[in-house]
Image (cartoon, rainbow, N blue to C red):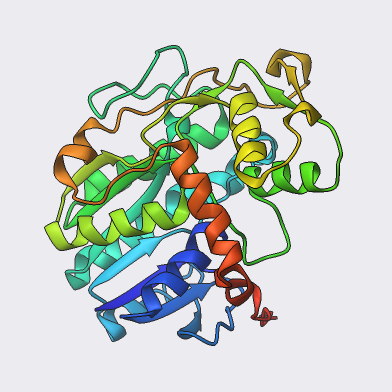
Amino acid sequence: MKILITGARGLLGSNLSLMYSETNDVIATGVNKPSFDFCRNQKLDINDLADLAIIEREKPDMVVNCAALTNVDYCEDHEDEAERINSEGVRNLAQACRNSGVYFVQISTDGVFDGKKEKYSEADIPNPVNAYGRSKLKGESFVKEIGGNYAIVRTTIYGWNHLDKFSLAEWMLDMMERGEGFGGFKDIYFTPILVNNLGRAILELYEKRYRGIIHVTGSESISKLSFAKKIARVFGLRDDLVSSISHKDLNFKAARQENLSLDVSKAQNILETRLLNVEEGLEEFKTLRDNGFVERLKDSKIEVSI
C-alpha cells in the first residue's frame, strides 16, 4: 500500500508513519517537513491547495489526517485558528481525496460530546462545549458533506511522542519516575487507546473499506486518577504520588466534560483488531520503550521550512 499521513510529526502521525512503513510505502507530511529515515517525507500544509496536489500526483491508497490543533485551552482563545486547521483544512483534504478516489481517514475526537452521558455511541447527537470540540465537529460535517470513501474515527489517544513533548501518559510517567507528586482528576472519565492499537484498527478499516463514523478507543472507561495509578502499577512505581483532585479546582479557560467515554461496541463487532483495556494498553506502552521502538521513533531531526 501507499499511505500518506498528514501531521506526521505529532503523536499519532509519527507512530503511524513508523508502524506502517514496515510493510508499506509511507509518505509522512507536515507543515514542517519531517525527516524520518524510515519513510518518504514531504512538506504539506493542508490549507495550501498547491501542496494538496500531492494527493493527485501520488494517488495513495489511503490518507490519514493526523493534522490538528488539539490544545483545548489554546483553541478557546484562538477559535479562528482552530477552525482553519480542524475544519477548513479537513474540508480541503476531504475534497482532494474525493477528487482522486482516495480512501480518507479523518481523526476526530470524543470532545464532540458534552460529557453528560455515561457512554456515547455513534448514534448519539454531538454537543460540544468548547471551541476545540466545535472545530472538530465542523470538520466531521465537511467530510460527510463532501462524501467519497471516508472513515471518521472518534478517539482519544496516548503513546510515545516523536517530538520533545508529553502525551498525558508520558507526563504522568515522567512525574512518577522523578518521584514528584501530582493530581489526577477523579471526576473526568475517558476511554484511552494506545496509538499503536489505534493504528492497527485504522489499517483494518481500510481493508474493510468501512465508510462513516466509528468510535475506536480503548475498551475500558477510567478516571484520569485511576489511569495514573495503573501507569504506576505497570511500571512498578509509587502510586501514592498521585493525589485525587477535581477538575473544578482548576481554572481552565475552556469548559471540560466530565465523561467522554465512547462506546466501542460497533468497532468490536466490525474489527478483528482487539481494542485493549487500560492495563493491556499500558503493558504494550511499556514494551514499546523496552524493545527500542521509542528510541527509533525519536531518532530523527526536524527539518524546518522557512
Q: Position of residue 162 (x, y in %)?
A: 62, 67
Pick the front one: 214 or 228: 228
Q: Residue at x 62, y 60 (%)?
A: 161
Q: Position of residue 17 (x, y in %)?
A: 45, 72
Pick the front one: 149 or 96: 149
Q: Residue at x 77, y 26 (%)?
A: 240
Describe residue 117's horizontal placement relative to residue 7 as left or right: left
Q: Residue at x 31, y 80 (%)?
A: 23
Q: Quadrant of the C terminus?
A: bottom right
Describe residue 243's horizontal placement relative to residue 10 as left or right: right
Q: Position of residue 166 (x, y in %)?
A: 69, 52
Q: Position of residue 286 (x, y in %)?
A: 57, 54
* Vertical comparison of 112 with 117: above or below: below
* Vertical comparison of 16 with 119: above or below: below
Q: Quadrant of residue 132?
A: top right
Q: Quadrant of residue 299?
A: bottom right
Q: Residue at x 67, y 78 (%)?
A: 302
Describe residue 39's horizontal placement relative to residue 163 as left or right: left
Residue 60, visible in the rendered structure: yes
Q: Quadrant of the N terminus?
A: bottom left
* Vertical comparison of 225 with 80: above or below: above
Find the residue positioned furthest to the front. 236
Please state the total of marks drawn on the protein image: 0
Describe residue 267's horizontal placement relative to residue 238 as left or right: left
Residue 47, visible in the rendered structure: no
